Image (cartoon, rainbow, N blue to C red):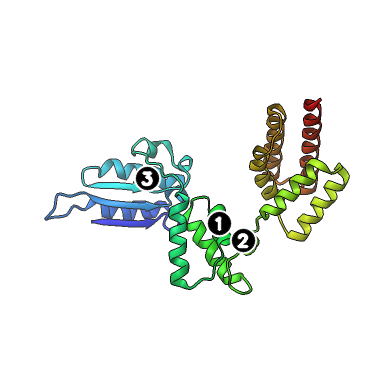
Amino acid sequence: MSLELNASDDRGIAIVRNEIQDFASTRTIFSNKFKLIILDECDAMTKDAQFALRRVMEKYVRNARFCLICNYVSKIIPALQSRCTRFRFQPLPEQFVRTRLDYICSQEQVDTEIDGVDALIELGCGDMRRTLNLLQSVAMSAVDGKVTEDSVYITAGKPLPVDIENCARLLLNDPIESVFQKMYQMQLHKGVALVDIVQQLHPFVFSISMPAAVRIELVSKLAAVEHRLASGTSEKLQLGAVVGAFAEAKEGIVNAAK
């Protein structure tokens, strides 16, 4: 009575026209219940396959129901969206993720520290699959197999919170020339991408005290840097833009205090 397909693997138009249509077109002899067709990660389906699926949904609406699961609803064509009831699921609360992590670590005998679990939850952003994948990677790659804050951030390739604090301190206090060289050397030494530093600096900017106008301008410039980095521009050049943005923010703070 049910058919489940992972659309990231079976996403061609042939699957829709053959397997899905054949299943939806047949009715059960001894039951009047609906058949259920579940398509996981359907945002990976091609546009042609989605249009073909729309026709199948219209044709066999009397004896079949469809459940479409996706990560990005914007990748689903409007014709399919209009034929569905949309349910949005929020990221999992921290307490549920922590409880599940503690259970899995105890069952798998993974040695963890409290700050390591906190780092997993922070980087997982409420996505249980991402959190568990990161936990598995850390447990397999760490030298002693112990899940610590350092090992989690190193495995994920993300800058440590202490590194972000050091970057913010340098950007707001040291001269431009020395800041640029120190941050560039930190990138080389730690192997951290500038886009990760910018993303972590964004919430830090809101945690420190500064005039609203200065904060708005600084956040806008950080957003512009991230956009340019996504377009494939030079990291070294954009690092200079970040340093310059904080230098202007520092002047704005000084002028506001006068």
Which sits earlier in the primary sequence, circle 1 or circle 3?
Answer: 3
Mark 3 burial class by Cα count in 10 Å: few <14, some 14-19, many 20+? some
Residue at 77 percent across and 36 percent down: it is 245
Q: Where is mark 2, residue-wise? A: 149
Contact (Cβ within 8 Å) of mark 1 with mark 2? yes
Tell me the amino acid under the disc marked 1.
Asp
Which sits earlier in the primary sequence, circle 2 or circle 3?
Answer: 3
Q: Secondary structure at mark 1?
A: helix
Q: Position of residue 241 (x, y in %)?
A: 78, 40
Return the mark for residue 52: 3
Q: Nearer the viewer, residue 224 or 35?
A: 224
Q: Nearer the viewer, residue 34 or 55?
A: 34
Mark 2 burial class by Cα count in 10 Å: few <14, some 14-19, many 20+? some
Q: Can you tell which of label 2 and label 3 is closer to the viewer?
A: 2
For the residues marked 1 and 3, what is the alpha-carbon distance in whole angstroms? 45 Å
Which sits earlier in the primary sequence, circle 1 or circle 2?
Answer: 1
Q: Position of residue 30 (x, y in %)?
A: 11, 55
Q: Can you tell which of label 1 and label 3 is closer to the viewer?
A: 1
Tell me the amino acid under the disc marked 3.
Ala
Q: Nearer the viewer, residue 121 or 115?
A: 115
Q: Where is mark 1, residue-wise? A: 118
Question: Is residue 13 in sight in this rendering?
Answer: yes
